[in-house]
Image (spheres, coloured by chain):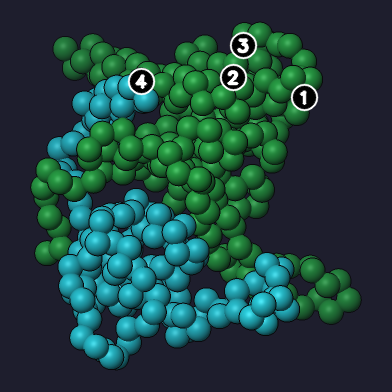
Amino acid sequence: MTGNEWFDEEAGPLVRSYALTRGRARPVTRESFDMMAVIETRGHPAYGQVGIGPEHLAILELCARPLPVAEISGQLQLPLVVVRVLLGDLLDQNLIGVLRPRREETAVNDGTVSEQLLREVLHGLEAL
Amino acid sequence: MDSKPSETVPYPVKILVAGGFGVGKTTLVGSVSEIRPLQTEELLTEQSVGVDDTSGVERKTTTTVAMDFGRITLSERLILYLFGTPGQDRFWFMWDELAEGALGAVVLADTRRLAECFPAVDYFERRGLPFIIGVNCFDDGYDYSGDEIAAALDLSEDIPVILCDVRQRESGKEVLTTLVRHVIGRQTAKRAAAEATSG
């Protein structure tokens, strides 16, 4: 054992969320990072770059394949609020991009989803 | 600036799974998901009033709300995420974020505790988000027909009520396809109504 036996799940994470974000509750950028916003790694930080921690690096590694914000949170087991702050740092340094689907396939003018997209979802489900 | 409109952008869509505590939301997510359900957490700070009557001091507490979700890759670019909504009423203000942009919702009901799905039905009706009712049939549940349940929930006639066993993948798939067909049907009806008034 490595000494971890003193800390069970009830004790909560050993490093508190506010430590990971250095006390920040919101991203530095204007981007709000919706749960379904897709993040893609665009660059790598210089060695020892200021303001980049292990969690930032974990995100960059994970998003080599584009992933939505919710899945980054789930896979890294970090709360959404923390992931958003970290993503803000990365976006600020141009290390990630936020991908957006083409407008015409996302929504029709009244804000509902396009029928073409719904049919694609239906066919996909039926083919499972 | 950071937008990259291209064919290769994976497009995530989401469907919500709501219902009372222990009704099988996570089971449904798990039975159709291609990954073991993941969990995402939101830290919520809320003002709690009257926690300690003797002091009368308002305290701020931080609550963690966990949501389970699963993933189904539907095509090269289309990925469906299924979110189990938090069961507790007091976390509802979070639902707005969850419901934003969702295709629709499945409200799971347990006939032994039917009232527990009322708040979810209310919420989606008010928000105008299309939903269906999935009646999760446990072995020892009472037998009711879909019509009886629709009447008990005071649903409008066009809302599908489907009996299911969310432990079964096929059954879970049927619940989801029923929902998507319902969403398509609703849009078609809406468009027809709009054309009738404009024409």
Q: Amino acid at mark 1?
A: Arg
- Asked if badge 4 and badge 2 are on a common chain, one would say no
Q: Is residue B126 visible?
A: no
Identify whether A31 is placed above or below B174: below
Can you identify the residue that label 1 sits on? B112
For disc 2, the marked residue is B164
Distance from the alpha carbon under mark 2 to that under mark 3: 11 Å
Residue B72 in view here: yes
Q: Residue at x 77, y 15 (%)?
A: B142
> Is there one chain holding both mark 2 and mark 3?
yes
Q: Percent from the top left, x then y, of residue A74?
A: 46, 57
Mark 4 highlights which residue?
A126
Q: Are marks 1 and 2 on the same chain?
A: yes
Q: Residue furthest right?
A: B54
Quadrant in which residue B135 is drawn: top right
Give, as a three-letter code, the residue at label 3: Gly
